Amino acid sequence: MTKTEDSKSTMRTMRLGHWWRFILFLAVLAGAQRSNAQDELWWKSTTVYQIYPRSFYDTDGDGLGDLNGIIQKLDHIQALGFETIWISPFFKSPQRDFGYDISDYQSIAPEYGDKQTCLKLIEAIHKRDMKIVFDLVMNHTSDEHAWFKESASSKDNPKADWYVWKDGKGKNGRKPPNNWKATIGGSGWHWHEGRQQFYWASFLDFQPDLNYSNPEVKQAMLDVARFWLSKGVDGFRLDIFNSIFEDTAFTNNPASLKIVPSEESPDGFFQKMKYNVNQEESFRFATELRAVVDSFQNPERFMVGEVFGDVETIKKFTSFENKDGLHTIFLFQTLSTPFKAKKWRKMVEHFEGNFPAPFVPTYVFSNHDRRRSITPLGNDVRKAKLLALFQFSVRGIPFTYYGEELGIEKPKLPLKTGKDPLAQRYKAIPQFMVDWTGQSLNRDECRTPMLWDTTAHAGFTSGEPWLPVAENLREKAVSVQEEDEESLMNFYRKMIRLRNENEVLQMGVLTVDEGFSSAKIFAFSREMKGQKLLVLMNFSKRNQKVESVSGENLISTYMDFSKTELKPFEGRIIRLQ
Ligand code: GLC
């Protein structure tokens, strides 16, 4: 071969090389686009399992759950069929509010592990094709955070303005600057001897609010988000996100007759929370945060906000029209809707009517602040199965709190000895009054350790558990339910598998079925790509006759069921022909 021929052939090879590379590039791009398309949807069709790390699984015998414990128990969550895991905060913290009082956002609390274990956890979850969501506490830090210590040290230090400081009123300036109440009642203003000023805390006194009107604070917290996103975290649950901004004129809140805040409104303690909650600036901040989160892709990242407010407020936080705010919000009405067919129908119609697709509602029945979901159901496993059937067949993102799949019940733990700072704060309230309301002021009750097996402390720890293990419930442990085909846990597995295998249950259009719905039965269908599933739920304790429909029974909360009637609290899904 002459030199020219040689160079021609080299050119050809090069061209061919480029050509193949180009094809390869297109193929990779196509692949990436395909996975992009899927990834874009992942959070819309996902299922979330919430872990309270302190109570999940202890691997070092100190009586507290840890990150290694989560790694070791990933099989359990994956076997249930969940895709996403949200973990309550495990960052450095004095643990006065068990992690919701952070003193360093980029370090791991040593009792839970270290940075390396955290990165290992992220990797372990991703290896299983699952997602991990962190809990981002942006509104406040611990009063032991270096930022607060510096801010409190004088009125003119570089961080003097990082928190919400204000002179007091009255002759000696010892009266709170205005009438604002904390979200848990009582004035949210706290006197600081050092600065001779008050600081604002939306929650407890040791959780001072950051001052988001200061651009440096905003940047510092957006950097925290960036830091964890760059480590591969798939999204955030945003703690009390509606308290981020306060009115900078510190206008007094108007009076209200409302005593206790509710799911739809933070107003309470005889006050309209007009100037300290749900501010326009907070809605705008949601879009700023979204832009940061969106700058990380493959996969698209996700945010769910803890927000209390009416439909309009929720829409504003999500920037409903432009879809450039938070991806979704907890719709907490699920927690207070009575277990009745008509009420549930109303709730679903309310969500579907106000938050139609592409908005994705959330369905949550308990968390680390609320009663265990089976408690208001009278600890009735039949009802718990119906709840699960509903949660994984309705249009929205289901959130399951660890132990909910076992039917862990709320134990009675007295306020007086509660470890929860809220219990401490309210310990003067007579126990009989707390029992009478049926509510839980002692959040220890929903944080008792996970039940793994029938050994001592239900296999949670080899040491002394930080909260009492519900030893009387050991028959509900994972190892026991594993062996029982009809157990609640096995029903969760079947139901989630059904959802995972049927796109129509994830993304299908939901329509209330007028024909089957009644005072006792709530029925709806899910429809997509020519497929139609009918979901029937009997909310009564008696058998209910139903017209037999032609179709395939996909699942029932009972092993044996009849075509023409629904058993007490039976739920069933039928693929219509
Ligand atoms: C949220 C958390 C709760 C915490 C509080 C203060 O409501 O869910 O557990 O105590 O915010 O961060």
Image: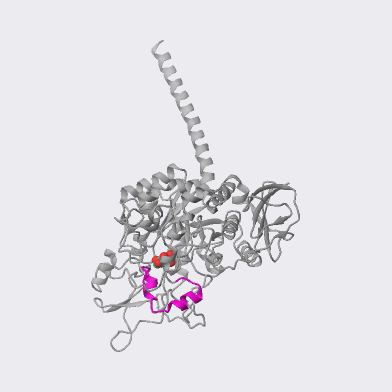
Q: Residue at x 43, y 66 (%)?
A: 445
List x then y, in percent, for residue 65.
36, 55
Q: Position of residue 241 (x, y in %)?
A: 44, 65
Task: Judge by depth and name the residue closer to the eye, 369 or 201.
Answer: 369
Start-end of magenta stretch: 417-440
Does the magenta portion include 39? Answer: no
Quarter the N terminus occupies: top left
- Which of the pair 486/180 is nearer the observer? 486
Q: Quadrant of ligand 1?
A: bottom left
Q: Is residue 177 left or right of residue 558?
A: left
| Residue at the bottom extreme of this rendering | 171
- Does residue 421 show up magenta in the picture? yes
Could you tell me if residue 545 is visible in this image? yes
Q: Residue at x 38, y 13 (%)?
A: 3
- Going 30% across and 84% down the picture, which residue do you hit? 174
The number of numbered badges drawn on the structure is 0
What is the basis of the colouring in this image? Answer: one colour
Residue 351 image offset from top left, x and y in percent = 60, 63
Q: From this view, report whether residue 267 is shown above or below residue 121.
A: below
The answer to whether 546 appears left or right of 111 in the picture is: right
Asked whether, in this view, residue 15 is left or right of residue 120, the answer is: right
Q: In this rendered view, identify the residue nearer to me: 514 or 441.
A: 441
State the image quarter where residue 64 is shown: bottom left
Residue 151 in the figure: left or right of residue 343? left
Seen at 42% across and 48% down, the residue is 73
What is the x, y in percent for residue 519? 70, 66
| Relative height, residue 289 to residue 574 (above, below) | below
